[in-house]
Image (spheres, coloured by chain):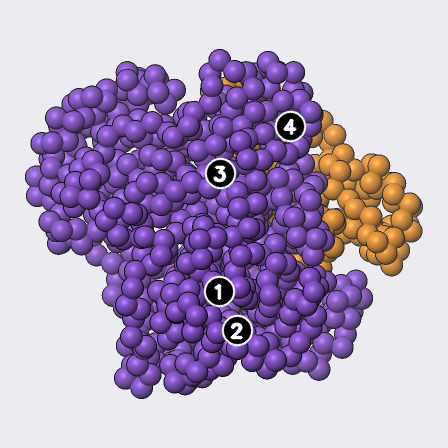
Chain colours: A purple, B orange
Amino acid sequence: MQATPLKISRRSFLQGSAVTAGALSLGLLDFKSWATATAEAPAIRIPTICGGCGNRCALFAYVKNGRIWRIEGNPEANGNQGVVCPRGHGYLHDLYNPNRIRSPLKKVDGKFQPISWEQAYREIAQKINLILLENGPESIFWLNYPQLNHAYALRFMHSLGSPHYFTHGSTCFTARNAAWNFTVGKLPSNDLAHSRFILIIGRNPAGGIELGEVKNIVKAKEKGARVVVVDPRHSETAILADEWLPIKPGTDLAFLLAMINVMVNEKLYDKRFVANHTVGFQQLEDEIINYPPEWAEKICDIPAKTIIRITREMAGEKPHALLHRGYHGAIGAQYLNSFQTARALAIANALLGNINRKGGVYFAESAELGELQPTHPPPAGPSGPKADGTGIPGRYPLGSYVDGISHSIPELALRGSLKCGFVYHNNPLRTNPNPKRVIAGYKKLELLVVIDPVLSETASIAHYVLPGSFYLEADEAIDNKHSGKRAQVSIQRKVIEPLFDSRSGFQIICDLAKSLGAGRYFDFTLDEANALRLKPLGVALKELKARGVLPVGVTWKEGIGKLGTPSGKVEIVSSALEGLGYPAIPRWEAPLVSPDEKDPYSFRLIHGKQAIHTHAMTANQPYLMAISRRYDMIRLLINKARAEAIGLKNGDVAEIKSLIGEGRIRVKLTEGLHPSCVWLPSGYGIFSKHLTTAYDQGLSYNDFLPTLFDPAVGHAMSSEVIVQVRKA
Amino acid sequence: MTRYGMVIDETKCVGCYACRVACQNQNSLQENEAYNYLQEREFGKFPNFNREFLPVQCQHCDNPPCVSVCPTGASHKRKDGVVLVNKKDCIGCKYCIAACPYNVRIIKREGYIEKCRFCIEFVEQGGKPACMTTCMTGVRMFGDLDDPRSDIAQFIAGNRHRLREFKREMNTKPHILYRKA
């Protein structure tokens, strides 16, 4: 049975597979004639998943006369529960983007020339074989934004003998994940829909954008839950909140320590939970007396009486109260104290007794996809450590070995440890800090191969660019992203025949492996591999293709057993951390840098997402950029009083300068921002001339951010930057 | 009699613009053509601050100024309350744009005037307006105002004191009601 919200599906909607090329003759790139001609045409509905960001929401794509018409959310999917965000609706138009690459490209004398796939594979293999001989397999890396084929990318690197598979994690979430791992053994999810008190600190699900989370916040609110948002900026989520607490950026740790202080002092914590499921509470009692709310008020600018009141209200609803597990902001990768902030966040949740409880934070059910064994055994894992030092005591022991420290790639290239790289579905030249250094590093590589539908900044400096299919053009590997109260598997399906000579990510990985003599590890078709990985879940590939998303496995149950920490309990005190030379209990740690309070021009530069843009990948999308322009959203936010003190009026052009970069941008004056900072929306500042809509529009925070590595986790500390802002 | 209407909850819109792009796709509009817009308003002074987004689209008025000024009858009101433009009869004179107090009409590149149609063809086949179904916070309710069993009619009956008409002073008698903050 096909789930459909429409009664009409039997009559005028055909269920179908990808639309064949025959229909494409009708004004493929000419939107206007297509729109006129298709108003009455029948629509074909195909379930798939979105490629507009990493959430991979489940969709139904509708095709009319061979052209994508619209999408709607699949109501079955945990992650998006039937809705679609603006990026999803807008990004589908990139299918028809005139900036798309039409064939593989090779850089010859500084210019790209089209070549055949076979020629590209042959030349890439020749160059890599030489690099393997001279430098060994460790000199090769693969970098991607987490994507459907990550298991195959990892297999590819392992088949060559390289440990160097990277994600964007070190610029995003690695501090958060490490802290939750050390404290409760794994990263939990938020049971927002059943919570009575939701405190969101350093996260903006309504702008970030997490559709399912926002729907659940609204559900909880309708049942009477209170929502408090702690954020230097009045975020999209703050609009939904009962209360906005404008915290001084970089000091979330002080706020959380004071909350813990109140919980301990007033004995508001869940005594049974603490006694049975935590270690180190006594040491916490000793340590936390240092952090009364009156102390925190001076640091974080939230009044002590507010911290006390919020903590009491929250504890009154325990265990159906939660502090959002966090993501990038404050907790993920932005500050020197992000790891300790995330530790304090996890401990505050544990004191509410809400670990794996209804209305608290819970360990979501996630589908355990099968291996390709026994028919297709994997290559032996790499023997050596990663060159970035993740997981090695004395280097970045808290860093994620799986994700690596991807913004160290330029450094590793400059010192010669990395010689050759594949970049897939990622654009480090724009999304990593300190672009001049990033460019220098990536240019040092003897071979850079980029897989992308367009010539991004990174693709622009590559030796070879392979046109990866747009997500609507290709079947891909099955996905287990939609975790929740019941695990789900989902699948990306081909909706439209490829417009150009592009290939799916899966096929490119297999082709590359085969051309490099590692074909024996990739001796399967996509359907075979998908079916094998679904096998242990008892789900047929055919049914998944028909439905787009399917539930698998057991339903989540409340309750706490042995956790994945060394003690099996919540580690308020972590002897593992102590053994590595880090504080066993969270302690106040000031940000690395702070603005000069006496200098009226000195601000911390912070950033965040607008709901309409994903990283640097959607700015070139005319439908989304039209919103940025129409609503004048490409501006630097600045606190009104501070702006007026330095003679800046709404709409003025300001000059913004850090130690490493400078730029000009118009300002928006607001009362909704902490005075110590300026806020720059991420996603702009595209400098690839091949992206004609986005080129030279706005700035990126990365233009101002030096190359930094947190000393324990290695994350980018992307809000540890002070800028001078003046009227231009 | 079916009489279509909508309730827009002013307290729920976070300004994500999904409704804009969902509508553009549903109606095959170009990137600068939009049938709805958001008005951002800010209140208070730091740190006691709040803001709000007001979604605006054709109000499908019972007393539609666009219809009374239209010289050809292209702008018309149907029995079910939906105000539409018949593009074959539209001469592009823009009187309706001048008359509409809500600033929700656009000039299509082909020269005729268009605006939110409540996705009426889609609704007649059992669907709901695209701006409503895509919204993560559920800002909009849509349905038959004359059907006492419909969600929207029941909501209006129970919340009359919290609902308002946008620009009531214009006496347009809109079919969209706003739920006040």
From mark 3 to mark 4, how far is it between C-alphas?
18 Å
CB atoms at circles 1 and 4 under 8 Å apart? no
Circles 2 and 4 on the same subunit: yes
Instruction: Output the chain of dot 1.
Output: A
- N-term mark: 2 or 4: 2
| Residue under the point 56% across and 56% down | A443
CB atoms at circles 1 and 2 under 8 Å apart? yes
From mark 3 to mark 2, how far is it between C-alphas?
33 Å
Amino acid, disc 4: Glu
Is B84 placed above or below A72 here?
above
Q: Of discs 3 and 1, which sits in the foreground?
A: 1
Report x, y in % for residue A275: 8, 39
From mark 1 to mark 2, how far is it between C-alphas?
9 Å
Residue A706 is marked as 3
- N-term mark: 3 or 1: 1
Residue A655 is marked as 4
Q: Quadrant of the C terminus of chain A?
A: top right
Q: Which residue is mark 1?
A: A420
- N-term mark: 1 or 4: 1
Q: Of discs 3 and 4, which sits in the foreground?
A: 3
| Residue under the point 74% across and 70% down | A28
Circles 3 and 1 on the same subunit: yes
Left or right of A78, for residue A58: right
Q: Of discs 2 and 4, which sits in the foreground?
A: 2
